[in-house]
Image (cartoon, rainbow, N blue to C red):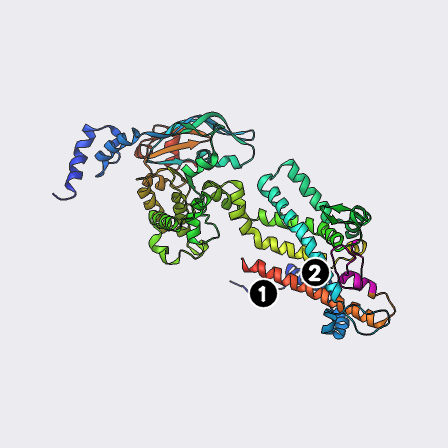
Amino acid sequence: MSPTSPTSMMDESIPTAQTDEVVVSPDASASSSTVEKSVRLSAPTIIDINNVDFHYGANKALHNIHFPIKEKLVTAFIGPSGCGKSTLLRCLNRMNDLIDGTRVSAGSIKISGVDIYHPSVDVIELRKRVGMVFQKSNPFPKSIYENVVYGLRLQGVSDKARLDETVERSLRGAALWEEVRDRLHTSALGLSGGQQQRLCIARAIAVEPEIILMDEPCSALDPIATVKVEELIHQLKQDYTIVIVTHNMQQAGRCSDITAFFYMGKLIEIDATEKIFTNPSQKQTEDYISGRFG
Amino acid sequence: MDLSRKPRVRLIFSRAMDIAVGFVTLAALVPLASVLYMVVRKGAGNLRWSMLWELPPAAGMDGGGFGNALVGTLLMVAIGAAVSVPTGILTAIFLTEYSLGSKSARLIRFCAKILSGLPSILAGVFVFGVLVINRDLHLWGWNFGGFSAIAGGGALGILMLPIVILSAEEALLRVPRFLREASLALGANRTQTVLHITLPAAISTIITGVMLAVARAAGETAPILFTALFTSYWISSLHEPTASMAVLIYNFSSVPYDNMVNMAWSASFVLIFIVLVTNIVSHLVANRSK
């Protein structure tokens, strides 16, 4: 059978057999993605965001945000600048704690059932389990090796064999090992921008988190480096839950399973990525995706 | 398209400003250059190597040197640095890493700025009033009273402290926030972040600030005059009057003996040389890390 024939067969059968959601993406993966989508949306919840309000001083940045984030899927936050997507992301590992005058003023965020804003929660432990990759690659002014093992060293690990093993595993995990294996002890600042960002990903996965937050990880990268990071995101979701904030809608379309659209501090719509990009249920989402504003 | 140069009023004005700025810059260099020229001409010519390790001559005698003053200055600057550098750096860390923007931080920063404008003689008077005047001030088994290298070093430390605080604060603030965030996001606490990330990233700039403080302290006369006094002998303990380059220059430049006046010039030259070397070293340290 030629590779094209199943596609054409499906093309004919889908419009009558399936819902209209599928019609708009009548490619080879259309029918399988429908199945996948229902599987995805029924994946277990790992982060439960319940009616969260967030304030910067007197300014309310998030309004009653309420949705679950599913385990081992890539969830993308999209929306125009200032819509609150990065704020929400930084709530998930409490990085906002570092900014004076900010607070989650209502609601709760639970990770694996634990309210992460409860006074008994150790923020350090939380951040070990919820890693983060930033917009601007931010390697420490240390060697590549020391960058990767930083998190472990903080935990008091000094066993050379274990550190070596972690460096190789993490750098392989971040698709950087082959490029840097011969210069692990040279400065990380000598790497290219894309390599630095993958090093930051390696550094995040070295402490074996469950969730990785990515705040516009490719916004400062060229297209080739971006492709590499996106491929990496695909691999990483085998093991990690990934939440990614992006301004690049093609990127959200390419690498996420679920997309949440925010506008003016409110969650407008969240659904399977194909659905959001092909047939959003809200007019605002459609306007944003089609480039009419933002 | 005609791209040829044409005389224009604004071009003429611009050229006139260039020339004016050049002249003013040269004029600003005149005092510095003349001081340096005089010190080098009068100081370097009379300098003998033996001056670096001989004791000051008696009035009207030939020969001698300022070895004890050199040792005293280095010693008191070291004491001042030992007091002010750890305190100053820790204060700066408190200001930038633990209490940025808080009321106490603003108060401390304000005090440091006031202190940095403190006339140096007041630092001397303060230490004189607190330590020197109490001839038998025994604390932790040490005598802090009377004229001593400790009192002199303390006075220099007070002068160095605001310079160290403000320059270290500046250096720490220049460490990008994203480095701190990266460290915290990996599960570091604030102390770990300071020790492993912020301080190493800022250390070369902090060293520059410390060197500037050292250079300033080495040349101070007024605070030493009140606290360490002067002596013509080698120092034998930290609790006795101690010679210093600055006070030696002050004393010897106003006596009617040519040998001593010449020696004051030579001591000035050596002191400027020390300050110059300190500055060059600090610049090298700062540039190496860039």
Query: Is residue B177 at all visible to an observer of this figure?
Result: no
User: What amino acid type is highlighted by mark number 1?
Assistant: Arg
Kindly indicate the quadrant of the structure image that contains residue A185.
Answer: bottom left
Residue on which the image places disc 2: B74
Q: Residues within 10 Å of mark 1 (few under 14, many from 20)?
A: few
Q: Is residue A26 left or right of residue B253?
A: left
Q: Which mark is residue A238?
A: none
Lower position in the chain sequence, tag 1 or tag 2: 1
Q: Are marks 1 and 2 in contact (CB under 8 Å)?
A: no
Q: Is residue B212 magenta?
A: no
Mark 1, secondary structure of its residue? loop
Q: Chain of mark 2?
A: B
Q: Name the residue located 24 percent from the left edge and 28 percent from the top edge.
A: A19
Q: Residue A44: x, y in percent?
A: 32, 29
Residue A279 visible in the current orientation: yes
Q: Using the image, determine if residue A119 lies above or below residue A246.
A: above
For image coordinates 81% across by 49% down, the residue present is B135
Select label 1 or label 2 by which is in front. 2
Q: Is residue A55 left or right of residue A158?
A: right
Towards the viewer: B91 or A286: B91
Point out the residue furthest to the left here. Answer: A1
Quarter of the view holding residue A59: top right
* Residues rendered magenta in the picture: B227-251
Q: Which mark is residue B5?
A: 1
Q: Chain of mark 1?
A: B
Number of labelled discs?
A: 2
Residue B44: x and y in percent read: 74, 72
